[in-house]
Image: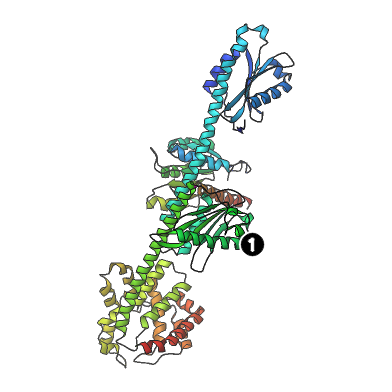
Amino acid sequence: MSSTKGKLQVGLDWPEITGLMRYLTESGKLQIQFLDAERHVLSEGGKCPSCTSGGCRGIREQLASRALETGKICHAMCDMGVPVTATPIARFSTVFGAMLLCEMPAACLPAQSVSGCDPLVNTLASFVARSSFYELEVESLTSDLALRYEELAMLYEIGERIPIRAQIHTVMSYVVERLKGVIDCDCVCWVAQNGDRHSIHWLKEQERSDDFEQKLKLIGSELDRRVTEKSDVVTVNDLSQDDTLRQYAGRISSISGYPVGTDGEHYGTLVLCKIGSGTFHSGEAMLVLAVTRKSGVVIRNAKLYQELNELFLSTIKALVRIIEGKDAYTRGHSERVSAFSGMLADFLNLPVEEKEALSWSSLLHDIGKIKVPEEILKKPGSLTKDEFAVIMQHPGFGAEMLSPISQLKHCLPDIRHHHERIDGKGYPDRLQGDEIPLRARIIAVADTFDALTSDRCYRPRFGIEKAFQIVEEAAGTQLYADAAQAMAANKQAFVEYIESIKAMAPAAAAQQ
Amino acid sequence: MDADRNPSESMLVLSVDDDPCVSRVIQLKLENAGYRVEKATTAEEAIVKIKALRPDVIITDVKMPGMSGIDLCRACEGLLLDHDLFTIVLTSQLDDKSRTWVESSPKRRFISKPFSPKMVLSTIEEYKRARQLTCVV
């Protein structure tokens, strides 16, 4: 009979055991010992003169082994003439250990008590076997429960923890990372159709080699093809039986591919591999499929969000172009300020949400100029005090005009304060330093730089080096020093951008 | 760090949760990794065990009958002034105020339920490494 060994669970202080032991010792059994499956003594009770003097050493081990092998109660006599009984402690095919009893010589006892105790000894052994067995079951159920916890946490996190702005790669690396700890396999990899194949995978360290990764690439592509064709899970257990995949298999024994996607959208295939041996089962398939479907939803939501965002942004751009189209001097100004602001935000390492808000604020910063009369805006010479007072109202106008759009609520302070100065001499509210919102401070640097590098109705443009110099000199007084320094440290990027729009300008002019 | 504590002795973790399944899962995961684990089902029971056993790590639920896990954390601060104690708050819901408080100290960590037992283990391992590092210094 094939059997496994289990951990023996027994306590001499268990009330059930103490009761039976008292009865056994009273009825002539001298000593009880519990041995585990390796025949080590775990606990003992009572006192046998033969055992204490070492007279039964050999026979005990021998008898315990026999009981464990045969699964039956075994009797023997020790050197000092003490009868010893070994009772196996086992349940179904699991062996936990044995119970040894030393008895008073039969002659000293009423005849019935020696063999008459066997049923009682049996009861005690089966009680211990059962407790050990249940403990074993609890342990295996607990480890199963731990795995379910792991799965639940993974499913929960894929929905809850991945930010809405996450790119497809971020989502899939998260999925690969989480799955490797939950699913029993040696390699997890995501295969995308759009050129950047196999960019994300995890592989057991000892299996890493160029040759393996090459094979993985070929197997991944083939599996992705089949999964896309079937729009369903494809599992190949035992690759040597598959005509196409056999040649790439190497040490890979089984593979399973899951479509990543939702509602007809396909974002590649998630590939799981087992190396050496092992097959995939339908139980884990349901879980992985739930994960790939859910990640499909997360990816689609991110795409929809991005599209909505782009739609909003391009609508704003169109609006701004119409307004700026009236004035040849300011044409393209807002888009350039937006580009410069974006570059500054990158150099200053702003978080993604800040960058997004900044892209809207910077595009719309001058929208209030629509309420400023054209003759003031286009006046070639210097402005009168009254005319300048009107100009100074444009940031306030802009913020006020956009206030009904709730999605832009957080951008309104940026628009209102983009003409404030660090030293407090700006307008409209004469804020200073940190009182000015960060995004407004960045827009001010970008706005100043674009004004300097563009022709205006009242002056021609400055050379680009001169413009950099003016911005640097204004750092800390008019302009936000950190942003001005970020510009000074990355001049090349700004020069390249200006060159690139110059190159595009003739084409745009031809279009118009 | 207690001077009388044997550094080679495995760390003792106390899991406090009114759901015995959670403590059982944590116990299995951590014992397999070589930690000693004790369990308590209420914060009150936990306090008795903390005084008696002086665990190195406490993993506590927040919503429990009687004292809450957050109250337990605060009580521990007063209880074990001379003792290095790392606390993991393991819960599905935590109001912002409590969360800010939990995260205000490197000696406390918040892990949300449903939780990954692996993550609990790796958080404790991380703490253990950091502590060994400071011990060497």
Residue A454, image x, y percentages:
40, 88
Colouring rule applied to residues: rainbow
Residue type, numbered disc 1: Asp
| Res A161 seen here | no
Magenta stretch, residue numbers? A274-281
Residue A398, image x, y percentages:
28, 76
The residue labelled by disc 1 is A211
Image position of A76 with respect to A190: above or below: above
Quarter of the view holding residue A230:
bottom left
Q: Using residue B116 as the reference point, say whether residue A187 is left or right of it.
A: right
Residue A181 lies within the magenta run: no
Q: Which residue is pictured at 47% across the width and 79% down the height? A: A487
Residue A471, image x, y percentages:
44, 82
Q: Which residue is pictured at 38% across the width and 62% down the height? A: A301
Q: Chain of mark 1?
A: A
**Helix, strand or loop at mark 1:** helix
Residue B60, image x, y percentages:
46, 43
Front residue (pair A73, A229): A229
Q: Residues within 10 Å of mark 1 (few under 14, many from 20)?
A: few
